[in-house]
Amino acid sequence: MSEHIVSPRIYAVIGATLLIFTGVTYYAATLDLNHIYHGLNVTVALAIAVFKATLVVLYFMHARYSPKRTQLVIIAGLFWLALLLLLTLSDYLSRATMHG
Amino acid sequence: MQSQLPLLPEQASNFAGNVDALMLYLLIVSVFFSALITGVIVYCFLKFRRKHPREIGASIQGSVPLEAVWTVIPFLLSMLMFGWGASIYINYRTAPKDTLDIYVIGKQWMWKLQQPDGRREVNELHIPANRSIKLILGSEDVIHDFFVPAFRVKMDVIPGRYTTMWFRATKTGRYHFFCSQYCGTNHAVMGGWVTVMEPAEYSAWLSGSSGEANPAAVGAKLFEQLACNSCHLSTDQGRGPSLNGVYGSTVKLSDGTRVVADDAYIRESILNPKAKIVLGYQPLMPAFQGLVTEEQILNLTEYIKSLQGQPAPPPPAPTAGKR
Amino acid sequence: MSPTASSPTAGLPRAHYLNQAYGIRSWLLTTDHKRIALLYLATVTLFFFIGGSFAVMIRIHLLTPEGYLVTPETYNKLFTMHGVAMIFFFLIPSIPAVLGNFLIPLMIGAKDLAFPKINLLSWYLYIVGGAFFIYSMLTGGLDTGWTFYTPYSSIYSNSAVTPAILGIFINGFSSILTGLNFVVTIHTMRAPGMTWFRLPLFVWAHYATSIIFILGTPVIAIALLLVGLERIFHIGFFNPQMGGDPVLFQHLFWFYSHPAVYIMVLPAMGVVSEVIPTFSRKAIFGYHFVAAASLAIAVIGFLVWAHHMFVAGQSTYAALAFSLLSFLVAIPSAVKVFNWIATLYKGSISYDTPMLYALGFIGLFTIGGLTGLFLASLGVDVHVHDTYFVVAHFHYIMVGGAIMGYLGGIHFWWPKITGRLYPEFLARIAAIILFSGFNLTFFPQFILGYLGMPRRYHTYPPEFQVLNVLSTAGASILAVGYLLPMLYLTWAMRYGKVAGRNPWPATGLEWQTESPPPTENFDKTPEVTWEPYDFHHRPDLGLASPGLAPARGDD
Amino acid sequence: MHRTGELYGQFQTLDQQREAASLGMWVFLITEIMFFGGLFLAYTINRAIYAVAFAEASRELNVHMGGANTAVLILSSFTMAMGVWCSQTGRKKLLVVFLIATLALGGVFLGVKYFEYAEKFHHHLVPGYDFHFPDVKPEIAAQDPYINAHAQLFFSLYFGMTGLHALHMIVGAGLLLWLIAQAAKGRFTPAYNTPVEIVGLYWHFVDIIWIFLFPLLYLIDRHT
């Protein structure tokens, strides 16, 4: 059975971490971080979300133990999502006047 | 009129020559490569015909240097195409300072154009030759596109915001203009004529025209009808700032920033005044969004521009008892 | 040139995928990739003739500047449904779903695709999507243009937009699942010995196309879904009154729709990469470069979409960036064309119909590609955007390229699909008719475009009439020309000369098995030991090695 | 194409079949990422342009329900992962228990979602359905006089994203029901548990989408 078995202990640890970070992001939203640095609130919230998502992908979805090919597919998917977001934003952020 | 089988549109603007030159360069490169490829195909077609049914071709797998050659050469040629095209584009998108501003409003299946002095035309545009013209384009419904083939210019007209384009007509005459972004049933009919006239002829046309009263007057009537004058008095004692000489001046806002009172500022201040409050005044002015059409805004703007008479009085001290 | 490999009298193999089972159920519930390919062939041809009839009506209407054939509303519906029927229901599925489905398992030595049931589901999604489109066509038609630009499509159009959007949305999943099937099959089900660099270039081209299917199609699915939601619930993703930005729809739409043009042309390039070596009897020149060029086109194709929006009010900076990237995507296409014509050098060339279509493809695709450079260059694009120059450009790529490649592929593999050969002389005539009719139709449109005649116009100024009449003349030749292949290919299915395993002969693995192949594709799982397109180390092909005097008396 | 036991005809070995299934699912999840990506792009751009209106509208959302839902979904991911573990180690009974737990938690999530939507209908916050945004403080209205329209844009995106996510949850629940039926029949053994793994991958993906939706929609400027 070539498929790697992840022990329940790891699942429990990952599950707990995810719950804790949900609390952290919930609490972080109540702090006014924007005056420290403009837009820090969004950055923190997204950083936590990315961290949680990575945990789920690596451990719950076994990406860490999957063949190289699957890992390449995941990375390609995220790269293309970044393509869509960043290239379109390059148009919006460099427009002379933000209308509305 | 043009011949029955024209090959190139007339060159009637400052961009036309440059664009045609770039097109010619692209055409030469294309004809060269097409001829090269067709030539090689025909040559091989004839020379390497199959002599007998079981004949095999030579055993050639490929050659890296040749691959490099026909990667680098097309790359260099295309970079030249890019550079030349980009320079023209930057020229398209940076209007000179002293332009004659004409407002163009696209509406499902007609164009309303308004001269700086307020004269309005439908599907017709009269402009002086050899003068930089800036078109400020808006739309009242869907996306249209103002396209003048003879000037080699076009710009989409998007609802909800202004887009601009500029050109300088270099040859007098009448040229087509089209709507070139699909906008519904009569998309094909929604065009008209640009008439380029000598400057003298243009000013004669401007003054000689009977037509409706000039927009500044229409704007003045509107200014009363909408009771703008109840707050905007000629002096700063009213509840709203005086508008004398405000157009083009820099206005100090309540949040401490400064902004130049240009067309967009006036349009925004009419449609949603609370967005930018002049220092020392209360946000009392009602929003006119939905109450005034684009045309009425243009007339009001013209009227405000015509109030250039007195220099703007200094902004009142913030502590004055006008709260 | 008579086929050499098998004597004409040998009959068809007793049992093959066509006579293995009979009846409607054996076709409508089949999971055999070869039968599903034929199901696609039938439905794709149906939509081709629906779209084609619209095209003929458009061209007849444009004979006169005033246009007397149809009313403006009907004209707008004609060009819109011509666009939708041709792009979404013919060009995108044609080569991948028909030839790709049939051949990829055969070419890599597999029994079937990785997920046969999902393959059948893809066909049903295609049929349901097509049904919705035909429903929209019959209940008022669609007049938004195939690009569905908002706010016209979401607010102002009162034609049957929602069923058409639903149809294309469902049809999109057919593409996604086909792409998924191909990627997984090519990765996991290659026969022993079939390494990546022994894969035929047809498979490489479909691997690149599948990447676009997978990564691009979902974005147009969400874009059209949002327009559908706006129409049904009157909410405002792109509604300017609510602050939504119509240009955002264009970004989402073109993010897929530009790579979609590579979905249409890459498989045709795959066909040409198979046909040129076979009929020059010479290995493809620069195999690795042509394979890499396919992947490069698929990847860079995702970076260039905003060259469709140079005059749509996007920022100057973005326009410069996308114009530069658009030139980069032209380089791999140029590399492929140069490699094809380098293959001809010192080959042993025969003029069979597939070769005529392949050479026609190279000629027309080159013109199409070069005029693409006109559109990528900002200076010229501002003038020619949304004019007939653009119409001519993409027809050269899609009709001159994709359809020529498709017909070339159909003729090249017809013996493998049906076991019988098409009538050679008649097929060559049809190819020449199509080539000349095509050029007469679309070359005048380049001139029309530069003169400034906008697209989608039901009337035009009188000075454009001469060129429009020429174009309509060409279109009538094309209309007749496209009927010919359908007629003689159907005739050949029953009466064509029996082809045998390898009539050309060609080097692909699909030519090792019977024609038509058994349901299991191969009697036993094949072992691949040879390099692709290597005519010199293939004694099984029965060809003379070079330098050997041709043995007299060969048939 | 004949099928011997659990091995489908077109595959040579069970391992090849498992690899194909797993790769196929990951490729499908990539298409889902691009599908939701279009929505996230629309949200990002509109929020950047109408920051004030989006912050104000986001305050109408019930952040406690959102937070609870996130926890529920993470727990369901945990139980799903445990289910996959059980199928790998042959614990057939425990597999059914964990699958039912995952389904139950999914049901709780959809229930909470139902109440949230009901609340929106009650407060006239459903776009295109007599949308009426409550009056805001003057200085907020000053910053964005079209706040009613831009708030309707926010709620269009809110219903679009959470609605699509809920739809994916319902599909996931359907898959789980089918999976529970198969597991109850004892079909899954350590040698053949591909369907459990595939549904697991799908479920975790739907959880990841919510992990991003929650902060983006609910947690904008909660501090003022």
Image (cartoon, rainbow, N blue to C red):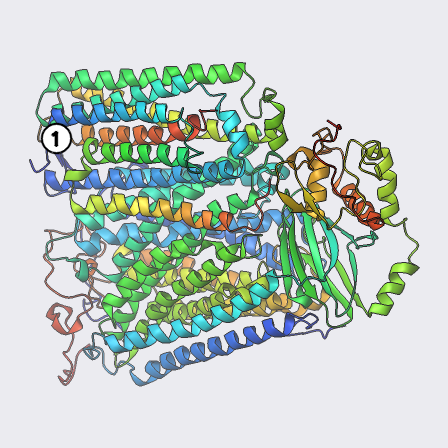
Q: Residue at point 70% right, 31% down?
A: B319
Left or right: residue C243 compared with residue C70: left
| Nearer to me, B180 or C323 | C323
Q: With respect to residue B308, does B173 lie above or below?
A: below
Query: Residue C152 location, x and y as percent?
Result: 61, 42
Q: Quadrant of residue B48?
A: bottom left
Q: Is residue C43 above or below residue D147?
A: below
Residue C210 visible in image: yes
Q: Residue at x 60, y 73 (%)?
A: B18
At x 40%, y 51%, the residue is: C92
Residue holding disc 1: A6
x%, y% of residue C387? 60, 61
Horizontal side, residue D124 vs residue A90: left or right: right
Q: Closer to the camera, C118 or C510?
A: C118
Residue occupying the point 37% across, 67% down = C331
Q: What residue type is disc 1 on?
A: Val
The chain under label 1 reads A
Q: Quadrant of the C terminus of chain C?
A: bottom left
Q: Is residue C545 toward the left or the right of residue C310 in the image?
A: left
Q: Position of residue C268 (x, y in %)?
A: 36, 60
**At which x and y percent is residue C15?**
18, 49
- As drawn, the residue found furthest toward the left would be A1
